Structure formats: C-alpha cells, structure tokens
Amino acid sequence: MRVAVYGGSFNPPHVGHGMVAAWLHWTDQVDEVWFMPTYAHAFSKELTCFSTRLKWCAALASDLGSWAQVTDIEQHLAKPSFSIDSLNALKDRNPACCFRFVIGSDVLPDLPKWKSWSEIETKFSPIVVGRDGYENPDGSVVFPGISSSEIRARMKAGLTVQKQVSAGVHNLLLHEVPL
C-alpha cells in the first residue's frame, strides 16, 4: 500500500491540509494519507496539547473519508519529535507499506536544520506541495494560503473560522475542544 505521511503541527488542521490530502489521493499518488501531528516540536513551537490536536486530525480524516487516517506514532517516541525517527518507526511497524513524506514549500528554507533530511529524501521520496505566499518548486500545485495561526487569531478575535476548517474540526472547536 502506498501511504503519504503528512506531518505537521495541525494546530488546528484546516481545509488547506484537507485539500492537500485529497489531491494526493485523487491524483492516485497514494492509496492513503496518514496525518501525523508532531508530539513535541523540534524547533520549540508552542502547541495545543497533543491529544487535542490528534482529535482535530481525526475529525478532519473522518470528513475526508476512509482513505485518510491519523497516526499517533510520535507520542510513543523520544522527544522532541524528529520526522526521520517517526518515519523509520512507521516503516518498522508497517513493512508492507511504501511511505512518502509530505511537506509544504513553507518549510523548504528550514530543511538544513532538520535531522537527517538526506535520509528522508532517500528513503521516503518527499512530496513537496506549494503554498500561496511562499517560493514554490517549478511545477508545484499551489494550495490556498490558509494557516493555523490565522485560524487561532480569528478565534481569539471572536471571528468565525467555519470556512477555514472542515465541518468536523469546526464542531470540535466550537463545542468540545476550543483553542
């Protein structure tokens, strides 16, 4: 099975994340997309608690369909979370899967800071997706400039985020798991 591992903070996940996952599936690049929220950010980014972000990702995956899943692998590994360790652990636990790693073009400038980026390139054939407002590789599909930080700011200001998140995530943000 071909699996795209889509790592990120997902603080919260938004429709841009959903569009990327759907595009990967609809264009037959992969059979499944697994959202992998980071447990402890390698660059010390402040995050909502992991269990909440995991629940948000599960709501987004449910809104997308059975081909979208969530993995909690990072809560079982050493902290901070490094993508290469998570990807290797997933491969060890799922040897029949062919994993590819999904990143947004917004992280390209930071790749020299990543642990073992060259190993990720070799073993997990990254898929780089374009983001509006960032330098994108030639031929990239560029996805809308929706950001989790924008969503958090809108919610803090009392503004709606219904158009920026999936219905399931929106329901959680409103009723169960607020930011």
Image (tube, helix red, strand yellow):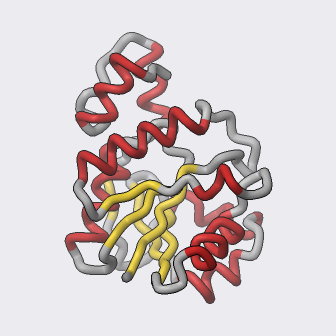
Residue 17, how many percent across, how many down?
Answer: 37, 52
What residue is at 43 percent from the left and 52 percent from the top? Answer: 133
Query: On the picture, is 65 further left or further right than 56?
Result: left
Asked where in the image residue 170 lies, by quadrant, the reply is: top left
Query: On the picture, is 57 further left or further right than 7?
Result: left
Asked where in the image residue 20 lies, by quadrant, the reply is: bottom left
What residue is at 41 percent from the left and 67 percent from the top? Answer: 129
What residue is at 49 percent from the left and 44 percent from the top? Answer: 10
Q: Quadrant of the N terminus?
A: bottom left
Q: Which residue appears farthest toward the top when viewing the image? A: 158
Residue 69, how many percent across, how many down?
Answer: 38, 58
In the image, residue 34 sits, relative to residue 89, either above or below, namely above
- The mark tally for this picture is 0
Q: Nearer the viewer, residue 45 or 2?
A: 2
Residue 86, how many percent across, how many down?
Answer: 65, 65
Residue 111, how many percent across, how many down?
Answer: 68, 68
In the image, residue 21 sits, relative to residue 100, either above or below, namely above
Can residue 135 be seen here? The reply is no
Query: On the picture, is 86 further left or further right than 99?
Result: right
